Amino acid sequence: MRAIFIAIACAAVFCGAAAAESENSLIRQGNSSYNAKAYDKAFEAYASVLGRDPKNTKAFYNAGDALYRLEQYDKAAQSYGAAAGDKKLKESALYNAGNAYYKQGQYDSAINSYKRALLLDHSDKDAKRNLEIALKHKNQSQQQQKDNKKNDKDQDKNNQQQQNNQDKNQNKDQQQKQDKQDNSGMSREDAERIMQMAREKEDATMSKRQATPRNNQPEPNQPEQDW
């Protein structure tokens, strides 16, 4: 930022009006406060001038400097914009407005302000350097936005893949459950249980049959006796 303080010094013959003299005094007070780093008091002094003379471009410029130091960059840019109506202040006002826009991350507005300043002064090295920096950060910001979109897209893809896998597993479980049922709709466990009961009943029947000898079953021979 270029802090150019406009200290208006008027000879009594040119500044006969008491109001004008008071405005000049306020600007000097504002400059004094600014130099003392009392930026809030400096702004109050410049604002008082603008309250009396809303077209005072010098007060707008200095108010922009105070607002910039107070980190109120949006208002500082507006104040510099008003000061740019003065041909003598225009190039510096545009340059400072570019700085204020840059601080807000408004790279397009900053680039535009630096370019306009360079059109007025092609030898302004500071404006050239800051223009390059603003262009660089704009490109980085755009690349970051692209990367963020890509990451979001990849995340959505991963989420969809996870959902597909989950659906696939659910379908697999359902299919396995269905495979356990026979054609009658009976589960395999129920079928095996009934078959086991049938086998147990059949075993019991066989045991009963074996307990009753067949009629044609020959009696065993008596062992011979040794007399």
Image: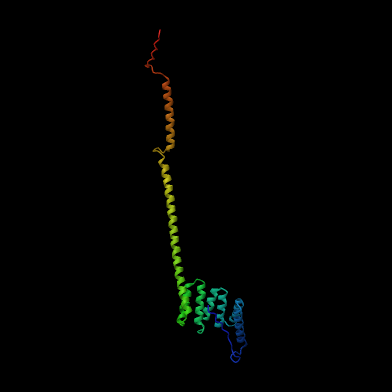
Pick the residue in front: 117 or 137. 137
Q: Against 151, is 220 above or below?
A: above
Q: Quick one: quadrant of the C terminus?
A: top left
Where does residue 22 sit, x and y in percent of width and height?
Answer: 62, 85
Total marks placed: 0
Query: Which residue appears at 44% of the width and 31% of the height?
Result: 197
Q: x and y percent of residue 97 in the render?
A: 51, 77
157 vs 126: above or below: above
Q: Residue furthest front?
A: 226
To which quarter of the image does residue 179 belong? top left
Check the image and tell me how it is coloured.
Answer: rainbow
Q: Is residue 211 left or right of residue 104?
A: left
Residue 35, percent across and down? Answer: 59, 80
The picture places residue 65, in percent across and down from the top left corner, at 56, 78
Q: Is residue 176 above or below residue 111?
A: above
Question: Looking at this rendering, what residue extends furthest in the bottom direction?
Answer: 13
The front one of 50 and 164 is 164
Q: Residue at x 43, y 32 (%)?
A: 196
Of residue 221 and residue 140, the one placed in the foreground of this image is: 221
